[in-house]
Image: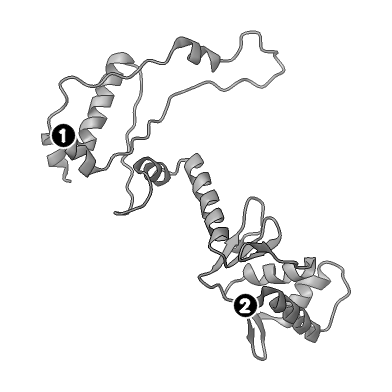
């Protein structure tokens, strides 16, 4: 939609009124007057965000447009609260994006609560659809929804490969990183092959996510049925 088209659209002659928030609700969010001086100051409202889930087609069917609605809201705010500052932004999302319009808008505008819920939903769906879930933050592996019985060293070995996805890791590097750095008894490089065989045995039908590069070492290859969860505070592949 061009800027000239937006300017030519008529404005609402009678903008819809915003419902006033009862004073008691506002007072409840204000800092208490008798709050002890040594307590952190309570946060107070400084404004609000109104997410509107409405695409251009639905707006047109209602006889309005998104710019028209934004203008109406701004004029209503200017009448009710002349000192209020406003900023409007349009949420852009791929055509055909699934979900409720409001949820799509909140995600497109990077609203933290919506992002957290979307991530949680993605994690739950990963478990529901099966496959491999390597949970770095919780140090566990799920195979088709069931927890695999990896030892600590087996998980550390898989994690080391996962965090370096697509890169072939030599046996000497694995020994140095997973045994020498931890102060454990250092095995021979061929002992790594034994640990990898045990790891693959526990991965079952997903054993080929750990590839052998003949004469060099091992590599993690992600498949479509593999999900990696990093979580807060977990090692990130961006470090490597």
Image vertical order of residue 81 relative to residue 207, above or below: above
Would you say the residues marked 1 and 2 are in contact, meaning their CB atoms lie under 8 Å apart?
no
Q: Which of marks 1 and 2 is nearer the N terminus?
A: 1
Q: Where does label 1 land, which residue?
A: 63
Could you say which disc has been placed on residue 218 in the image?
none
Q: Which of 100 and 111 is in front in this view?
A: 100
Query: Residue 86: x and y, percent?
Result: 34, 27
Query: Residue 149: x and y, percent?
Result: 75, 66
Helix, strand or loop for disc 1: loop
Query: Residue 176: x and y, percent?
Result: 78, 75
Residue sitting at x 34%, y 31%: 87
For label 1, count other residues whose C-alpha is less than 10 Å away and answer few (under 14), some (14-19) or many (20+).
Answer: few
Q: Residue furthest top?
A: 34
Residue sitting at x 73%, y 79%: 196
Image vertical order of residue 50 relative to residue 2, above or below: above
Residue sitting at x 30%, y 20%: 77
Q: Where does label 2 land, which residue?
A: 205
Residue 221 lies left or right of residue 111; in this view the side is right
Query: Residue 160: x and y, percent?
Result: 68, 69
Residue sitting at x 29%, y 39%: 54
């Amino acid at each position: 939609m061009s800027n000239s088209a937006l300017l030519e659209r008529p404005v609402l002659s009678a903008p819809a009124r915003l419902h006033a928030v009862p004073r008691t609700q506002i007072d409840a969010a204000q800092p208490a007057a008798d709050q002890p001086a040594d307590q952190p100051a309570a946060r107070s409202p400084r404004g609000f965000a109104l997410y509107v889930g409405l695409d251009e087609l639905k707006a047109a069917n209602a006889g309005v447009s998104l710019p028209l609605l934004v203008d109406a809201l701004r004029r209503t705010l200017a009448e009710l609260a002349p000192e209020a500052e406003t900023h409007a932004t349009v949420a852009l999302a791929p055509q055909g994006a699934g979900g409720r319009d409001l949820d799509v808008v909140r995600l497109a505008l990077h609203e933290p609560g919506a992002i957290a819920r979307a991530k949680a939903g993605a994690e739950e769906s990963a478990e529901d659809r099966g496959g491999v879930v390597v949970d770095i933050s919780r140090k566990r592996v799920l195979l088709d929804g069931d927890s695999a019985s990896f030892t600590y060293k087996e998980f550390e070995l898989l994690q080391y490969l996962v965090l370096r996805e697509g890169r072939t890791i030599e046996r000497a590097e694995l020994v140095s990183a997973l045994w020498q750095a931890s102060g454990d008894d250092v095995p021979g490089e061929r002992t790594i092959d034994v640990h990898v065989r045990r790891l693959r045995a526990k991965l079952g039908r997903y054993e080929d996510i750990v590839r052998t590069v003949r004469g060099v070492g091992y590599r993690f290859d992600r498949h479509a049925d593999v999900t990696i969860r990093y979580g807060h505070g977990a090692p990130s592949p961006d470090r490597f």
